[in-house]
Image: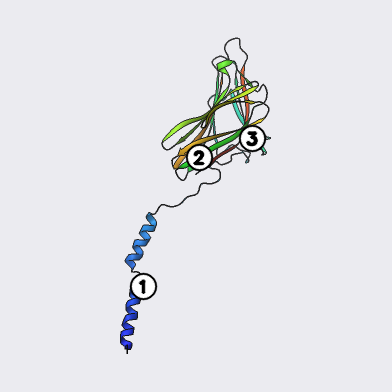
Amino acid sequence: MVSLGFLYVLAVAVTALAAPSSASNSLVSSLDARAPKACTNPANLLQNPSFESSKISPWIYHPYYPKVTTQKIVDGGYKSNHALQVTGNAKLQNDQAFSQMKQNFTTCKVGRYQLSWSMYLAKNAAQGIDYRAPGMNIWVTCPGGAAQVAYFTFRPNVLESYVSNPRKSSKQKVDQWVNTVVDLGTLQAGNCTLDVNWNVNGPVKGDPVSTLTLKLDNFVIKALS
């Protein structure tokens, strides 16, 4: 017959083994703190992507030549109420209607990302002869490097595009919204910047004035993986 004293000792021993010590608790907490935290990117890493606030911020617009470049929020965007309209007007050969818009964004983890946006070029809204035709280029800078991801040339009746990934060139009609998608490849986690640059070169003597009026909307940077 088992004595009551033996059962009491056994119960105490089992309780002691089952309860973790304070040292064990401390170790578990330490390991939890050191474990990598899972993160989730938002559906769009950019803010005010369709200029729905009727203001340009948090985009930063910089007119390198304020007298010949302008920007304003206008009505009639792509599937939205607003769009950004940029203009450039180069009358003299040495005029450079160069302007830039950028926004900082954060990738919370290493992975593949995609950039897309929409733009509208009206007929005859771009004027410029040959290599002096107005243009736009887009750069993305992240930890590890920077890359030009797309380049565009604007002409009176056509929009010419050059996209880096997948690498292709194409021509689009004017008087319509054109949607462009660029695979940014694998980006490192950290602070990044999207730069959109426009340039309207001055005309050669005797050529017409170089001009550009362009609407942009619906910017999206999203994670693919």
Residue at image position (37%, 54%) is 34
Dot 2 or dot 3: first in sequence order is: 3
| Amino acid type of the residue that numbered disc 3 sits on in the rendered structure | Ala
Q: CA distance from mark 3 to mark 1?
A: 65 Å
Question: Mark 1 and mark 2 in contact (Cβ < 8 Å)?
Answer: no
Question: Mark 3 and mark 2 in contact (Cβ < 8 Å)?
Answer: no
Judge whether 100 appears above or below 29 on screen: above
Residue at image position (32%, 80%) is 10
Q: Secondary structure at mark 3?
A: strand
Residue 177 sits in quarter: top right
User: Percent x, y for residue 168?
Assistant: 54, 28
Residue at image position (30%, 85%) is 6
Per the image, the residue denoted by label 2 is 113
| Amino acid type of the residue that numbered disc 1 sits on in the rendered structure | Ala
Per the image, the residue denoted by label 1 is 18
Residue at image position (36%, 72%) is 18
User: Percent x, y for residue 3?
Assistant: 31, 88
Per the image, the residue denoted by label 3 is 83
Mark in the foreground, 2 or 3: 2
Q: CA distance from mark 2 to mark 3?
A: 24 Å
Quadrant housing the N terminus: bottom left
Question: Between residues 39 and 196, which one lies in front from this camera angle?
Answer: 39
The image's mark for residue 157 is none
Judge whether 46 appears above or below 150 on screen: below
Q: Is residue 112 left or right of residue 75?
A: left
